[in-house]
Amino acid sequence: MRRPCLIILTMLFLAVAVVAAAKDGAQYFRLLEAQEYALDMLYSSELERVYVQVEFSVDRASLDPEARYGMFLDNSAIVQAIMVGGLDQTSYQVSNLKPALFKPKLNQPELLLENSPNGFLGINLPALSQLPPIVQIKLWYYLPVPPVTEQKDQNLATDLDAKRYWYPRNIHGDAKVNLKLTTVKYFILQIGDVAAPRVDGEFGRVHEISYSDKAKKPATFRLIRDRS
């Protein structure tokens, strides 16, 4: 799950900020989306953050060389590394975006509001001729997680609300998510209303679940203190 520190530092220094109202305004934006995602996650209760590796694939034939590509991701995410087709890539942040700048036109304009918890993360793609027919995209980042507190149901818990794009989900259709999470032994993972199967090992607890994330009703990621 972890990438070499040198690559991570290099990617952080190479990240650049781009304003959407750039001189090349003729360009438009498209989302990198998939019908299936693999998430490998590690929750640190001491640091109150979750480390995430996301992996998904797109068809090279579906990529437009005239478009700028990216994804929506929680604003608090710290991106550590990105690989596209096995090649290390850089990312950039975009501001002042409008729904009409997307093709297809963005169906969730609230994502572009100033107070949105999410933002558009642009990804620099290599020349399409360098990519294989099926392009594998990998993204490494971490997110802060709220402190564990007593909830209305009297459970000690924390969560990443569905309104937060805690992974770069597909906003145009439902997607299958294969999620693996490692925690200490006293947590239960709940996705939506479903508790994930879990196995305790010598050094922690591994939760694994596959579920359909609904574009119109995405799932909340919740961690509950196990009282048993």
Image: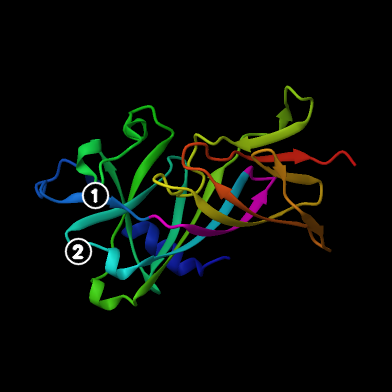
Residue 119 in percent (x, y) is at: 37, 40
Q: Nearer the viewer, residue 6 or 151?
A: 151
Q: Nearer the viewer, residue 101 or 158?
A: 101
Q: Nearer the viewer, residue 89 or 103?
A: 103
Amino acid type of the residue that numbered disc 2 sits on in the rendered structure? Pro
Q: Which residues are magenta?
A: 33-48
In the rendered structure, does residue 38 fall within the stretch colored magenta?
yes
Residue 110 in percent (x, y) is at: 36, 30
Q: Residue at x 15, y 51 (%)?
A: 27
Q: Inspect this view and state whether residue 15 appears.
A: no
Q: How is the image coloured?
A: rainbow
**Which part of the image, by quadrant, shows the N terminus?**
bottom right
Q: Residues within 10 Å of mark 2 (few under 14, many from 20)?
A: few
Q: Inspect this view and state whether residue 62 appears.
A: yes
**Residue lying at the far right of the rendered structure:** 228
Calculate the distance from the C-alpha at mark 1 to the C-alpha at mark 2.
11 Å
**102 lies above or below 116:** below
In this rendering, position of residue 186 left or right of residue 134: right
Please name the residue that numbered disc 1 is placed on: 29
Amino acid type of the residue that numbered disc 1 sits on in the rendered structure? Phe
**Which part of the image, by quadrant, shows the C terminus?**
top right
In this rendering, position of residue 156 left or right of residue 73: right
**37 lies above or below 214:** below
Q: Residue at x 46, y 63 (%)?
A: 56
Q: Earlier in the sequence, mark 1 or mark 2?
A: 1
The reply to whether dot 1 and dot 2 touch (C-beta < 8 Å) is no
In this rendering, position of residue 149 left or right of residue 62: right
Q: Residue at x 34, y 76 (%)?
A: 133
* Image disc number at residue 65: 2
**1 lies above or below 32:** below
